[in-house]
Image (cartoon, rainbow, N blue to C red):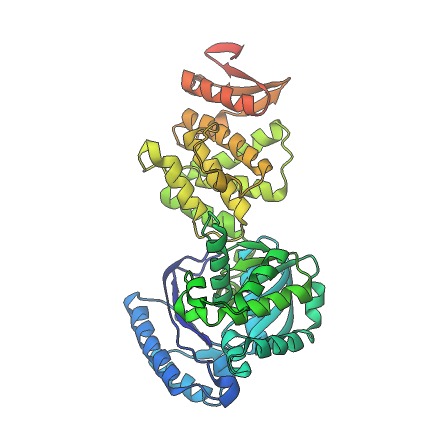
Amino acid sequence: MIDIGSNSVRLVVYEGLTRNLTPIFNEKVMAGLGREVQSTGLITDDAIAVAHDALRRFRALCDTLQARKVLAIATAACRDASNGPEFIAKAERICRVRIRILSGKEEARYTALGVVSAFHDPDGIVADLGGGSLELADVEGGRIRLGNTMPLGGLALQDISGRSVKKAQKFVAARLADSPLLHEGQGRVLYAVGGTWRALARLHMHQTRYPLLVMHGYEIAAKDAIAFCRSLYRPTPSPTRRFAAVSKGRRSLLPYAALVLERLLRETGAAKVVVSVHGVREGLLYSRLIPAKRRQDALIEAARELNVLRSRSPRHGEELIHWTDRLMHAIAVDETADERRLRHAACLLADIGWRAHPDYRGEQSLNIIANGGFAAIDHPGRVYLALAVYYRHAGPDDTELSPRMQHLTTPRLMQRARVLAAAMRVAYQLSASQSGVLPKTPLVASRGKLVLKLEGPRMSALGSERVLSRLKQLARLVNLKPQLVSDRSPARDI
């Protein structure tokens, strides 16, 4: 997909049109098409030249990658500038595809769909800050209500205010005061979409030394975000040094993005800011999926793909879901629906590190999962997945993991990760990571005991001291006494 924005021109090539979008190539060029549109009504000649050069390369890359379908969209600068149609006409000849100029309402709708596709049961105000405009929408689950489109993008504010942050601040306050949709954000989430807000969040990560450098789902409490935003647009002796963690193309726009975000937080009364890396492109592609695909859980589908690509037996991962379902029911774990889907995802990811050296399987699995391109999961859930699979290899009593990583999740999820990991260690030792064993070797709870049943000659022969040791470990974590039942010996406590 080719995305001609007011600040950047970008090409993203995806592996396919699926519920879990996987980019195989991503490149952007900072063309600055919207730099002077508000004051002159025109896209500048130098910005046009940069953008057309980028589009020539993007078309050649599409041909090189043998992209089956090329979609192209353009946003605020191209719809607002009087020479926008002329620019687009030449761009279409270069790209050899029709370029769809999105209206403000279309841009807001597709951005909201991008958030719907990327978060599990979202609830809040979506704010998409581009170079030329700000789009607003209200999302609750799959319901979308569109709000205003306003010329509050970073480049537009620079242009309107003559690069005066004070003038921009007054202009932003006046425009946002007229948006009734914002008054419905009290206590909810403000979903921040757009490259400059991602740069702002990256700077916050850098300054707070946040240990998980994953942008999607990054959260900042509203009070902290307001204080941080104010620090970014106040005069400082060394702005270049202060913004060193941000790319040069974004630095000059950070003060404007910060004052818009601060004002939005004050107007909405939102509880926190959550960053979304999914926006208009992902929303447009999500809208092209059939309804059954749209209803799929993006996290589970991503985990399922990794299970197929990296596990020794993908079917074993699916069986592990049902095996642990029975276990959690047997030991009366009070799982929420979200905790259950996280456990299911962890089961699908449990064997993705098996090709690594045994001493490093836990560490490699943790890095792949903690930093993976997953959607529909927050950071505490992401850390839970990583820890569950890490402990499956290293053991649930391992203490070498960084405390800072562990503190990103909740004590409840930490304990759930250890219990699930201990169950996985029984399952994998018993089954040798192959399918067909777990359905015949259930774990049940009875009269204060955790009972592993090995029924039939072949299943009974799979019992070993190593299996018994791991069963003891699991039983201790769930406060039960372990017991083995098999055809080779009568029921015995361990």
Relative to 110, say whether 363 is above or below.
above
Residue 44 at x, y percent in the picture: 41, 86
Residue 53 at x, y percent in the picture: 32, 78
Residue 347 in sight from this viewpoint: no
Residue located at (55% from left, 19% from top): 451
Say which quadrant the N terminus sits in. bottom left
Counting labels gives 0
Residue located at (67% from left, 57% from top): 188
Residue 218 at x, y percent in the picture: 53, 54
Q: 234 left or right of 238?
A: right
Q: In which quarter of the image is residue 94?
A: bottom left
Residue located at (52% from left, 31% from top): 418
Relative to 119, say whether 405 is above or below.
above
Residue located at (58% from left, 23% from top): 444
Q: 99 left or right of 150?
A: left
Residue 326 at x, y percent in the picture: 57, 31
Outermost residue, front direction? 237
